[in-house]
Image: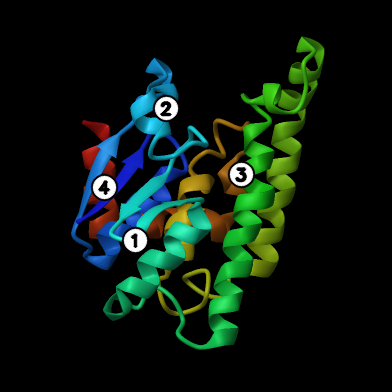
Amino acid sequence: MLRLFYNLGSISLASHIALEEAGADYQAIRINMRENDQKQPEYLAINPKGRVPALLTDAGVLTETPAILAYIAQTHPGSNLAPTDAWGFAQLQAFNSYLASTVHVAHAHRHRGYRWADEESSFADMTRKVAQTMAECFALIETEFLKGPWVLGERFSVCDGYLFTIADWLELDGVDPGRFPRVHDHRERVRARPAVRKVLAEEAT
């Protein structure tokens, strides 16, 4: 059985959605980061980075959302959560890498400025910039990256749960999702999926 370590309101939701969409045999284990569970020796032995998500597999522990999503898709091929051709899979990886390396990082500047600076004034400046940078990221997604009703076109993939997770932070980041109707429609389309509703309900309890 796979074991996913997650935190409420975090990027780990994307992996949780992928596991449910894949019909995987898994257990979701909550890490309460407000209580510093991620800094406890027991969790650091699993993920020395002290972050989520972490996926415990028979082969070892996987961290980083793009890697976890690729693993879930490739180990559950019947779920059709990723293209099987090299070009299609590379497109999936390109999109997920953009979310990980650019969009998620832009969001993190709102409340994790201590990762990049020491001065309080720097934190405030980074926070003020987030609405602009997130809007710029989503403008690009709106116009260039959504290939159909789903990120990759006509078929739901692990990209979609990932985009949904970050798009659901827009209001917190001071961005009106109504500015991006295709992204907004995508977000609500993902939210309506049975697997997603189940995961959201589980994480709400």
Q: Amino acid at mark 4?
A: Val
Q: Nearer the viewer, residue 97 or 36?
A: 36
Question: Disc 1 designates what residue?
Answer: 59
Other-residue count near label 4 (Cα within 10 Å), few / some / many at <14 / 14–19 / ≥20: many
Q: Amino acid at mark 1?
A: Ala
Please name whichever residue, 3 or 30, is drawn nearer the observer in this view of the structure: 3
Tell which tag, 2 or 1, sits nearer the viewer: 1
Distance between the alpha carbons at the discs numbered 2 and 1: 22 Å
Please provide percent x and percent y for residue 40: 39, 22
Mark closest to the chain's N terminus, 2 or 1: 2
Of pointers 3 and 1, the one earlier in the residue sequence: 1
What residue is disc 4 on? Answer: 199
Q: Which residue is mark 2?
A: 38
Question: In 3D space, how far apart are the residues under numbered discs 4 and 1 (Cα atoms)?
Answer: 25 Å
Question: Which numbered disc covers residue 104?
Answer: 3
Indicate which disc, 3 or 4, sits on the residue closer to the N terminus. Answer: 3
